[in-house]
Image: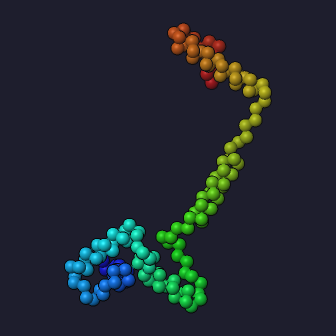
Amino acid sequence: MWNKENEFQAWLMEVKKLNPETIPHNKMKDHFIGFMEDYNTVTMPHEKFYNLTKWEDRQRAIRMGEPLPESTQGSVNLMNDEEMLRMKQRDKRKMNVSSQPQILMTQSQLQELRKVSHERVEADKLRKMGFDTGRKGVRYE
């Protein structure tokens, strides 16, 4: 309650139209529960009720014509996030393509691989039917 006192008092005055100095302590706690519910569910009517000092600094910078204070901590810019994700994926693809060796096989090597694969499938079928293949003629390397 003490960390968000400034935001809470601003919320009481602007949203609830109440003077915080005239409210009894028990009513103040009830209003604070409502304030924290809105705060936690991110349903405040204005961004200043989340961090009043940050909002005031930004307003002061706008009035003075200064560059706006950029704070990246806790803020999310979806466009930057999407661009960063695309760049990471592009870099990852480049790394995968460059790190994988190129496998070039001749036609005779491909035919030999097909033959070995076919022999393995045939031997497996025979073994499932109950025949003893004895691994003769079938390579398992």
Q: Report x, y in % for residue 22.
A: 25, 88
Above/below status of 18 relative to 75: below
Of residue 20 and residue 70, the one placed in the foreground of this image is 20
| Position of the N terminus by quadrant | bottom left
Above/below status of 87 relative to 51: above
- Residue 28 visible in the current orientation: yes
Instruction: Please give the name of the residue rendered at 70% of the width and 48% of the height, measured from the top-left corner.
Output: 98
In this rendering, the count of numbered labels is: 0
Q: Report x, y in % for residue 79.
A: 60, 65
Residue farthest toward the front in the current orientation of the protein: 17
Above/below status of 103 relative to 80: above
Instruction: Please give the name of the residue rendered at 62% of the width and 12% of the height, measured from the top-left corner.
Output: 136
Q: Report x, y in % for residue 23.
A: 25, 85
Of residue 67 and residue 89, the one placed in the foreground of this image is 67
Instruction: Please give the name of the residue rendered at 22% of the width and 84% of the height, measured from the top-left corner.
Output: 24
- Residue 6 visible in the current orientation: no
Q: Is residue 24 left or right of residue 141?
A: left
Instruction: Please give the name of the residue rendered at 25% of the width and 77% of the height, measured from the top-left corner.
Output: 29
Above/below status of 23 relative to 80: below
| Position of the C terminus by quadrant | top right
Q: Is residue 128 left or right of residue 50?
A: right
What's the coloring here? rainbow
Residue farthest toward the top in the current orientation of the protein: 131
Residue farthest toward the bottom in the current orientation of the protein: 64
Quadrant of the rendered image containing residue 17 = bottom left
Q: Report x, y in % for residue 32.
A: 29, 76
Quadrant of the rendered image containing residue 11 = bottom left
